[in-house]
Amino acid sequence: REPDLEAVFQATIDADQRIEPRDWMPDDYRRTLIRQIAQHAHSEIIGMQPEGNWITRAPSLRRKAILLAKVQDEAGHGMYLYAAAETLGVDREELTEKLISATQKYSSIFNYPTPSYADVGVIGWLVDGAAICNQVPLCRCSYGPYARAMVRICKEESFHQRQGYELLLAMVNGTPEQQAMVQESVDRWWWPSLMMFGPADGDSPNTQQSMAWNIKRHTNDELRQRFVDMSVPQAEALGVTLPDPDLRWNPERQAHDFGEPDWSEFTAVIAGSGPANTQRLAHRRRAHENGAWVREAAQAYAEKHS
Ligand code: FAQ
């Protein structure tokens, strides 16, 4: 029976249709999806921390309400994504253990600190902007539950991106000090944002197979290019400079040429030695331990009613 099942799977992929949880799928397809969805879920959960840093210090009630709502959305995204991963036969408890023991990755971008309030705006503009660029094609991913989760997440991400841009517009129209804060923050976040798309195509071991399975729809470099092209006019409108001396329009390619990210920094950050890795994981571990009583109570309640 196995070859038949494999042929059905391949025909579904070839017809650009969706694989659903009860369908047969190759073990490697399942493993790849668990890896990517779990990493994505962990990123949303860890991604609450950099901006969460500013909730108690937002400059007005309005800004605080917006930021609280955004960070809550990120928790929600983490939940939909853990739920999507669970349809592949893993459970959230197991994935959380892997996150806090650092055996599964989360996005490199959340290992950078947020020392300035302008970072809240720049994360919305660049980090959510990069996330949208990467995630819109995932709405057409071949695995149904992941693709459907992405539709809702992308709608919320585009709202997040606009709130960041709106905050930056307010700051660049403010005092010279506020303008300088925005530029300083852009200088720190630009290169790490480009690294969110993953290694260059030649160094990306997973891209080829993930594209053959219609999990990924574009390569890392294609999406990085799209992000650069999208960001340049937005930076101009804000009146900020992107910190790349090699960035220029190439009329032949009808795209921007740009410099090479520092891949040794990227490797160090995903290996655990970025500026805030230790702090991020310690915080998550502490939150998990502090929540133990809730899990125990829920368990006791479930047992009583079973
Ligand atoms: N950070 O062969 P590839 C957000 C790993 S957005 C850390 O190219 P792949 C929203 C990769 O896992 C951020 N690790 O891998 C938000 C692999 O390692 P492994 C999350 C990275 O999977 C905004 C190895 O390098 N978004 O959270 C990174 O084909 C604001 C080789 O790489 C997603 O996860 C990286 N940047 O392509 C929340 C999107 N890049 O697993 C709060 C879904 C690569 O073999 C605030 N994921 N690696 O040990 C994807 O699209 C893909 O997984 C890529 C990587 C494109 C990230």
Image (cartoon, helix red, strand yellow):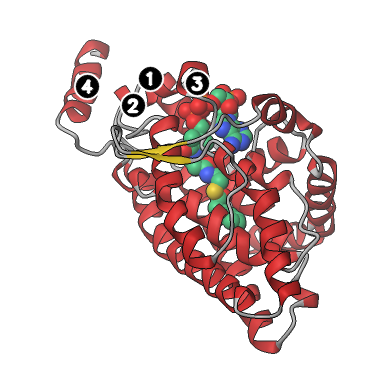
Of callouts 2 and 3, which one flags the residue occurring earlier in the amino acid sequence? 3
Tell me which corner region of the image, top left, top right, bottom left or bottom right, holds residue 59. bottom right
**15 to the left or right of 211:** left
- Residue 255: x and y, percent? 35, 39
Q: Is residue 89 visible?
A: no
Residue tagged 2? 211
Q: Residue at x 43, y 63 (%)?
A: 158
Report the front residue among 79 and 40: 40
Residue tagged 4? 10
Of the two numbered discs 2 and 3 in the rendering, the one whose residue sits closer to the viewer: 3
**Label 2 SS:** helix
**Label 3 SS:** loop
Contact between labelled residues 3 and 2, with CB atoms less than 8 Å apart: no
Of callouts 2 and 4, which one flags the residue occurring earlier in the amino acid sequence? 4
Residue tagged 1? 208
Position of residue 193 relative to residue 259, above or below, is below
